[in-house]
Image (spheres, rainbow, N blue to C red):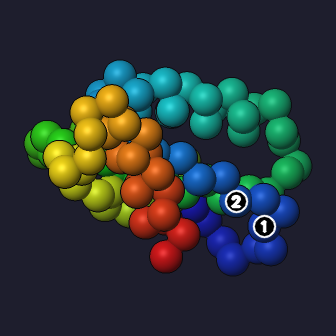
Amino acid sequence: MTGHLERELTICSVFHSPESRALLELNGKIARSLNDGISFDWLVADNRTNRVTGGGIDPNMFGSIEGVPFPHDVPQTMRGSFHLAYGLNAIKK
Protein backbone atom coordinates (compact mmCIF):
# COMPACT_ATOMS: atom_id res chain seq x y z
CA MET A 1 0.00 0.00 0.00
CA THR A 2 1.31 3.38 -0.84
CA GLY A 3 0.94 6.86 0.60
CA HIS A 4 -0.79 8.14 3.68
CA LEU A 5 -4.03 9.33 2.11
CA GLU A 6 -7.24 9.40 4.08
CA ARG A 7 -9.03 6.14 3.31
CA GLU A 8 -12.75 5.95 2.72
CA LEU A 9 -13.00 2.29 3.65
CA THR A 10 -11.04 -0.55 5.25
CA ILE A 11 -11.84 -4.10 4.15
CA CYS A 12 -10.79 -7.01 6.39
CA SER A 13 -10.38 -10.57 5.09
CA VAL A 14 -8.78 -13.87 6.05
CA PHE A 15 -7.23 -16.57 3.86
CA HIS A 16 -6.28 -20.08 4.90
CA SER A 17 -4.97 -21.87 1.79
CA PRO A 18 -3.31 -21.21 -1.58
CA GLU A 19 -6.75 -21.54 -3.18
CA SER A 20 -8.42 -19.01 -0.88
CA ARG A 21 -5.42 -16.67 -1.35
CA ALA A 22 -5.82 -16.87 -5.15
CA LEU A 23 -9.55 -16.07 -4.88
CA LEU A 24 -8.85 -13.18 -2.52
CA GLU A 25 -6.25 -11.72 -4.90
CA LEU A 26 -8.69 -12.07 -7.82
CA ASN A 27 -11.36 -10.28 -5.78
CA GLY A 28 -8.82 -7.57 -4.90
CA LYS A 29 -8.01 -6.96 -8.57
CA ILE A 30 -11.70 -6.85 -9.51
CA ALA A 31 -12.60 -4.53 -6.60
CA ARG A 32 -9.80 -2.11 -7.46
CA SER A 33 -10.64 -2.09 -11.17
CA LEU A 34 -14.34 -1.43 -10.50
CA ASN A 35 -13.70 1.30 -7.93
CA ASP A 36 -11.20 3.59 -9.60
CA GLY A 37 -10.86 6.78 -7.58
CA ILE A 38 -12.07 5.19 -4.32
CA SER A 39 -9.33 4.94 -1.72
CA PHE A 40 -9.47 1.89 0.50
CA ASP A 41 -7.18 -0.33 2.50
CA TRP A 42 -7.58 -4.08 2.44
CA LEU A 43 -6.16 -5.87 5.46
CA VAL A 44 -5.69 -9.64 5.44
CA ALA A 45 -4.92 -12.21 8.12
CA ASP A 46 -2.80 -15.14 6.87
CA ASN A 47 -4.45 -18.09 8.63
CA ARG A 48 -2.60 -20.83 6.73
CA THR A 49 -1.78 -23.72 9.02
CA ASN A 50 1.14 -24.71 6.76
CA ARG A 51 3.23 -21.62 6.07
CA VAL A 52 5.95 -22.44 3.58
CA THR A 53 8.38 -20.01 1.98
CA GLY A 54 6.38 -17.75 -0.28
CA GLY A 55 2.69 -18.20 -0.64
CA GLY A 56 1.88 -14.99 1.22
CA ILE A 57 -0.52 -12.37 -0.03
CA ASP A 58 0.50 -9.70 -2.59
CA PRO A 59 1.90 -6.81 -0.45
CA ASN A 60 1.22 -4.30 -3.24
CA MET A 61 -2.49 -5.03 -3.03
CA PHE A 62 -3.05 -5.89 0.64
CA GLY A 63 -1.75 -5.11 4.09
CA SER A 64 -1.23 -8.38 5.95
CA ILE A 65 -0.71 -9.74 9.42
CA GLU A 66 0.23 -13.19 10.62
CA GLY A 67 -2.96 -15.08 11.35
CA VAL A 68 -3.85 -17.25 14.30
CA PRO A 69 -3.38 -20.96 15.04
CA PHE A 70 -6.12 -23.40 14.11
CA PRO A 71 -8.42 -23.83 17.15
CA HIS A 72 -8.14 -27.57 17.85
CA ASP A 73 -9.86 -27.09 21.22
CA VAL A 74 -13.13 -26.00 19.52
CA PRO A 75 -15.68 -28.66 18.47
CA GLN A 76 -14.93 -29.86 14.93
CA THR A 77 -18.24 -28.60 13.49
CA MET A 78 -17.34 -25.01 14.50
CA ARG A 79 -13.56 -24.88 13.92
CA GLY A 80 -13.70 -23.22 10.50
CA SER A 81 -15.95 -20.42 11.73
CA PHE A 82 -13.87 -19.87 14.85
CA HIS A 83 -10.64 -19.82 12.82
CA LEU A 84 -12.10 -17.14 10.53
CA ALA A 85 -13.39 -15.10 13.49
CA TYR A 86 -10.06 -15.34 15.33
CA GLY A 87 -8.29 -14.07 12.21
CA LEU A 88 -10.66 -11.12 11.84
CA ASN A 89 -10.22 -10.27 15.52
CA ALA A 90 -6.44 -10.33 15.06
CA ILE A 91 -6.79 -7.71 12.31
CA LYS A 92 -8.87 -5.50 14.61
CA LYS A 93 -6.02 -5.30 17.11
Please name whichever residue, 41 or 93, is drawn nearer the observer in this view of the structure: 93
Can residue 59 be seen here? The reply is no
User: Gap in Å between the C-alphas at discs 1 and 2?
Assistant: 7 Å
Helix, strand or loop at disc 1? loop
Judge the density around disc 1: few (<14), some (14-19), many (≥20) Cα neighbours within 10 Å: few
Q: Is residue 22 left or right of residue 9?
A: left
**Crowd tier of the residue under label 2, counting other residues whose Cα lies within 10 Å: few below 14, some 14–19, many 20 or above:** few
Residue drawn at point x = 43 percent, y = 39 percent: 81
Q: Residue furthest front?
A: 75
Q: Are marks 1 and 2 in contact (CB under 8 Å)?
A: yes
Whole-percent x and y of residue 41? 66, 59
Query: At x 26% / y 39%, what residue is drawn?
Result: 75
Where is residue 63? Give x, y as percent.
50, 59
Q: As drawn, is 12 to the left or to the right of 68?
A: right
Amino acid at dot 1:
Arg
The residue that label 2 is drawn on is 10
Tell me the kind of residue under disc 2: Thr
Q: Quadrant of the N terminus?
A: bottom right
Q: Which residue is mark 1?
A: 7
Q: Is residue 18 left or right of residue 38?
A: left
